[in-house]
Image (spheres, rainbow, N blue to C red):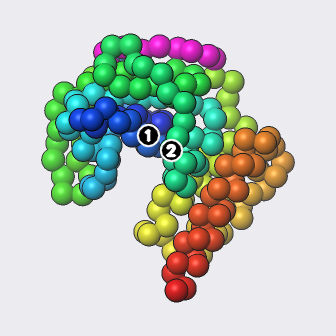
Amino acid sequence: MIQETIVTTQNSSGATHIAPMGIHYFGGDEYIILPFRPSATLDNLLTSKTAVINYCDDVRLFAGCLTGRRDWPLKPAEKVSGQVIDGALAHHEVELVRVEEDETRPKLFCRRIHSANHAPFQGFNRAQYSVLEAAILISRLNWLPIEKIEAECAYLRIGLEKTAGARELEAWGWIMAAIEAYKKGRKS
């Protein structure tokens, strides 16, 4: 199963990197994190050997990180050297156990060493789902045809318009601005 999460890692200077990431979970205490090369998440995890997997329902974190907004409140992790998203519903602190090398996307096998629940998950509404899916689409602007991205966003907008609150509308605006900036950059 792939879970949409926010992964926080730290570099050797202690600076925190925040990245939305689908992590693989098969049950138990094992997770697979698959960052693409090059990436700060990959570099940091290989260096520090630890990460924090954050479970969040504020979709602005996903959209924000993918549109250049990475300044989110953090608090110290409990068992690893790292940071937890302040406002995360839950988090898992993990350590790197082994690496399966790959030229494009290595598999980082991690083991959970600590978990904490901070608030109950109330479920996603259609607007939150729409923002998550649109955020995933903009992470693939260089891989997918822009026409496909625009068509899928047009469909996702239906659920957004029916159920969005202020947070979802703000996140959606960031995503739409990123798409427009990408299109303008292609035309120049």
- Look at 44% across and 40% down and name the residue there: 18
In the image, farthest residue toward the bottom: 188
Which residues are drawn in magenta?
112-120
Amino acid type indicated by mark 1: Ile
Q: Which residue is mark 1?
A: 18
Q: CA distance from mark 1 to mark 2?
A: 6 Å
Labelled pair 1, 2 in contact (Cβ < 8 Å): yes
Q: Earlier in the sequence, mark 1 or mark 2?
A: 1
Instruction: Please tell me whether residue 77 is drawn above or below residue 11 in the rendered image.
Output: above
Q: Secondary structure at mark 2?
A: loop
Identify the residue at horizontal 42%, vertical 19% (top origin): 76
In this figure, which residue is indicated by the disc labeled 2?
Answer: 70
Residue 45 visible, this angle: no
Q: Quadrant of the N terminus?
A: top left
Looking at numbered disc 2 in the image, what kind of residue is underneath it? Answer: Arg
Verify whether residue 71 appears in magenta.
no
Q: Nearer the viewer, residue 130 or 1?
A: 130
Q: Residue at x 62, y 16 (%)?
A: 119
